[in-house]
Amino acid sequence: MDFSLSEEQQAFQAAAQSFAREEMLPFAAEWDSGCVFPVETLRKAASLGFAGIYVADDVGGSGLGRLDAAVIFEELAAACPSTAAYISIHNMAAWMIDRFGNEAQRQAFLPPLMTMEHFASYCLTEPGHGSDAANLATRAERDGDHYVLNGSKAFISGGGESDIYVVMCRTGDSGPKGISTLVVPKDTEGLSFGKKEVKLGWNSQPTAAVIFENARVPVANRLGEEGDGFKIAMMGLDGGRLNIGACSIGGARACLELALDHVKARKQFGRVLAEFQALQFKLADMATDLEASRLMIHKAASLLDARDPAATQHCAMAKRLATDAGFAIVNEALQLHGGYGYIREYPIERYLRDLRVHQILEGTNEIMRVIIARRLLAD
């Protein structure tokens, strides 16, 4: 059992850290306040291999593993959790095409996704079906060599900006076995988008409804067989949960570092804050929870890389712990800053707003508990 990173992992950790510090951190507040989708910065990230971290290298991916991805996303999110999370979603959608697509699909869709000439979105959630994803209502009816797609998806990251939409839709009966996965290009006739949502955080990526009105999608764009869609979606989410957990760790780590600097410099009652034992205990707990979260994310990533049967349960455990702990650490860091933590001149409030949604997306933390309990009680 070796907890240290390999030399290769340390190298791309350093590359991600340098990129985040130089290309993301100086602009993150501006992206947040102006709701800027930083296309050119994303393409620079792609040039380092971050657009297809665990996509095969024959189509331009980096061919790395889920542990490698967790290391990278922690570093990117330490600068801007919102932008790092969009890169995670793009990776998830691209991996689904790589893993379940045939060779023609892989060659058609993946090379431009690997450079981020094209952007990708993952489309599962619907207005009436969030956590109850197996009962989604968007339907695709077969019509010769096309499907006619009708319905809508809600809260889609990249909605309106992405070029490729990986869509879970119903091609059969009710329940999970009636769901299939289609790759829908942005220029598909009958595809449109709702208004750009105004959000608490995650402002460097657009969020909008994706709407299908008799959209004709070639049968050739279906990933796998009819009925495979729910399995494909859930396998994509295993990795997505690790990535979003790693993003929480990165944001929390950045805020812990800011809090440490603050308590060493700030004086009250004639002493620096760092000398007060109550605050020392708070910092100790923050650091301990951060380390525990990282260990769980890395263990779950290692299990997913090994295709261990317990990986899904451990991904749910790690996501639940890391996103809950990450938000709590940022909240404590804000408290340690007092009023300064609440104003936008200081970055902590941005991290707080960005990390809050991590407890909701990629499966709510309540659903993570359902997954964990179901596995525990199955034996």
Image: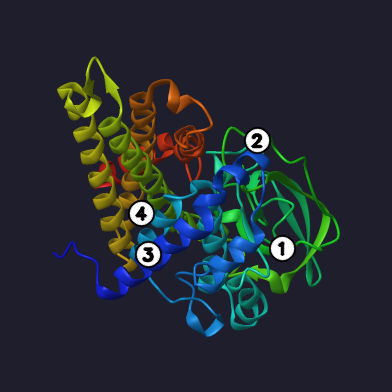
Q: Quadrant of the N terminus?
A: bottom left
Do we see residue 228 in this rendering? no
What residue is shown with label 3? Answer: 66
Identify the residue at horizontal 67%, vertical 43% (top origin): 35
User: Viewer-nearest of labels 2 and 1?
Assistant: 1
Mark closest to the chain's N terminus, 3 or 1:
3
Q: Say left or right for 195 vs 342.
A: right
Q: Secondary structure at mark 2?
A: loop
- Mark 2 to mark 3: distance in Å? 32 Å
- Mark 3 to mark 4: distance in Å? 13 Å
User: Viewer-nearest of labels 2 and 3?
Assistant: 3
> Decide: marks 3, 4 in contact (CB < 8 A)?
no
User: Viewer-nearest of labels 4 and 1?
Assistant: 1
Q: Say left or right for 326 vs 233.
A: left
Identify the residue at horizontal 77%, vertical 40% (top origin): 195
Identify the residue at horizontal 43%, vertical 21% (top origin): 339
Residue 134 or residue 279, whichever sits in front: 279
Q: Amino acid at mark 2?
A: Gly
Residue 283 or residue 312, whichever sits in front: 283
Q: Is residue 270 above or below residue 202?
A: above
- Residue 107 spot, x, y in % from top left: 63, 81
What residue is shown with label 2? Answer: 128
User: Residue 238 occupies which quadrant of the picture?
Assistant: bottom left
Q: Amino acid at mark 3?
A: Arg
Q: Secondary structure at mark 3?
A: helix
Residue at the extreme top: 269
Mark closest to the chain's N terminus, 4 or 1:
1
> Decide: marks 2, 1 in contact (CB < 8 A)?
no
Mark closest to the chain's N terminus, 2 or 1:
2
Identify the residue at horizontal 52%, vertical 55% (top origin): 24
What residue is shown with label 1? Answer: 163
